[in-house]
Amino acid sequence: MTNPLRPSRVALITGASTGLGETIAEFLGGVGWRLVLTARTESDLTAVAERLSGRGVIVRAVAGDVGEAAHRARLIAEASSLGRLDWLVNNASQMGVSPIRPLLDHPVDVFEKVLRTNVIAPVALAQLALPLLRETDGLVVNVSSEAAVDVFPCAGIYGASKAALDQASRIIAAELADTGVGVTSVDPGGMRTRGYAEAEPDFDLSSVPTPDVTLPFWKWLAEVSSGEVSGRRYLAQSGPWDTK
Ligand SMILES: NC(=O)c1ccc[n+]([C@@H]2O[C@H](COP(=O)([O-])OP(=O)(O)OC[C@H]3O[C@@H](n4cnc5c(N)ncnc54)[C@H](OP(=O)(O)O)[C@@H]3O)[C@@H](O)[C@H]2O)c1
């Protein structure tokens, strides 16, 4: 039962209708956090929200595109109406054209769309969330990828966007030093998800783990302070994380 003197924490999770975002929502909801969830496809998002609500989790599900300013404002308003925000999890992401193809074969408007979803939206959400995060010593979690660091031909737009997100995370973390608000990057590692399957339909994903493989990392992250992890980049499948 929630202690009225210590209201349960609130997370805003983007891309929560499937894959890693759904897993993080399931985990946080299961340990008593209240949730604001979003993704573009309303039916998928509603299915996740109804399942969690059925287990007693307080969920606000708002379908929409994080690339749109009005939608971002709605998401922050939902968190505000829950009274606080502890984590902003920027997990929603796009690869570009699926199946993936060389960077220079991508239409420029696809590049712009990927950057808007993977880089601009996370930073814009952090801007809007900052006043709420200041009240809780909250944390921005930007979900990154190995593609930000290594060279994966045909994942160039995605990799460039994640590299930009990593650098933005480091810079904002430095700019917010000593405010109590933290920013961290998390590379969850390869996971068997819808997005991965769509990007590489010919690749056999049967030996790739499901997003549940990252659960020990999220359990650990929920127990540490924002200051301890701010400015750092974690590999969620390669603990122990406190030594990184
Ligand atoms: N899977 C992997 O192996 C892997 C490896 C490294 C890093 N990652 C990272 O982990 C995160 C989750 O990956 P995943 O594989 O679980 O992704 P996924 O299966 O592709 O799911 C993406 C989620 O984001 C939503 N979404 C996409 N664009 C959106 C937009 N513009 N506005 C709002 N929601 C949007 C999708 O729903 P709608 O389409 O309905 O909007 C869905 O809920 C991503 O940041 C990804 O880069 C994944």
Image (cartoon, rainbow, N blue to C red):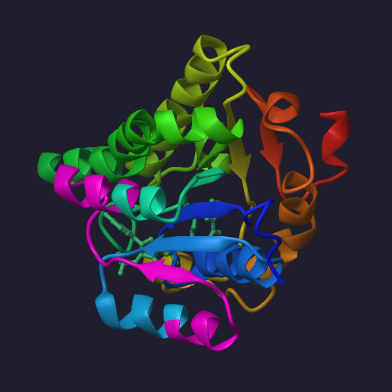
The percent coordinates of residue 17 (x first, y second) are: 42, 71
Residue at 33% x, 46% y is 76
**Relative to the observer, which residue lies in front, 91 or 145?**
91
Position of 21 with respect to 80 (left or right) is right
Is there any visible trace of residue 93 in the rendered image? no
Residue at 71% x, 59% y is 214
Q: Quadrant of residue 186?
A: top right
Q: Is residue 147 above or below residue 55?
A: above
**Relative to the observer, which residue lies in front, 83 or 42?**
83
Position of 118 with respect to 91 (left or right) is left
The percent coordinates of residue 181 (x first, y second) are: 57, 26
Q: Quadrant of the N terminus?
A: bottom right
The percent coordinates of residue 47 (x first, y second) are: 40, 85
The percent coordinates of residue 103 (x first, y second) are: 28, 40
Q: Is residue 76 above or below residue 134?
A: below
Residue at 28% x, 52% y is 96
**Relative to the observer, which residue lies in front, 137 or 229?**
137
- Residue 58 falls inside the magenta stretch: yes
Is there any visible trace of residue 198 in the rendered image? yes
Magenta span:
50-76
